[in-house]
Image (tube, rainbow, N blue to C red):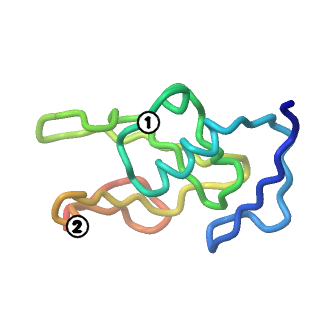
Amino acid sequence: MAGPVYTALIGPNVTPHFVSVTPYQHENVLRTVLDALEIPVHPGASAAAHPMTEFFAGYVTVTSPAPNSVSGMQVPVSATAPKPPQKIYQLQVWDKGTGRKLAESAPGTSAFRQT
């Protein structure tokens, strides 16, 4: 028999005392953990499940460019903060392979300068 499962999220980026009204399933938890660990494989139903991002403070959704996309010399970057009035303070671009920061915006802006 299925029923509600209590899940507690603990960590420095978790919004304190937050209780969601969204009904999540096991595949949402799996997707959230895999994304947090940067594991690119999402088995079974976790491939189509939404991660539980509403639990995390400061979570930003990058809508452009698409993950693992290849672009030319100029890449448009688009990102959104999860809830108004939250705003994005600074954007940074990192090379995941080398761990090197490639570019960053000035604090309070979205105009990039290459580092």
At horizontal 58% and vertical 30% (from top left) the residue drawn is 49
State the residue in front, 26 or 97. Answer: 26
Label 2 neighbour load within 10 Å: few <14, some 14-19, many 20+? few
Residue 50 drawn at (x, y percent): 60, 34
Residue 29 drawn at (x, y percent): 63, 45
Residue 5 drawn at (x, y percent): 82, 46
Distance Cα–Cα, label 1 vs label 2: 23 Å
At horizontal 26% and vertical 37% (from top left) the residue drawn is 68
Report the quarter where the C terminus lies.
bottom left
Report the quarter where the N terminus lies.
top right
State the residue in front, 62 or 5. Answer: 5
At horizontal 45% and vertical 62% (from top left) the residue drawn is 90
Q: Residue furthest bottom?
A: 12
- For numbered disc 1, what is the local secondary structure? loop
First in sequence: mark 1 vs mark 2: 1
Residue 112 drawn at (x, y percent): 30, 56
Amino acid residing under circle 1: His
- For numbered disc 2, what is the local secondary structure? loop
Say left or right for 54 vs 51.
Answer: right
Q: Residue furthest front?
A: 1
Residue 5 lies, with reference to residue 55, above or below; the image says above
At horizontal 18% and vertical 40% (from top left) the residue drawn is 74
Say left or right for 23 vs 48.
Answer: right
Residue labelled with disc 2:
99
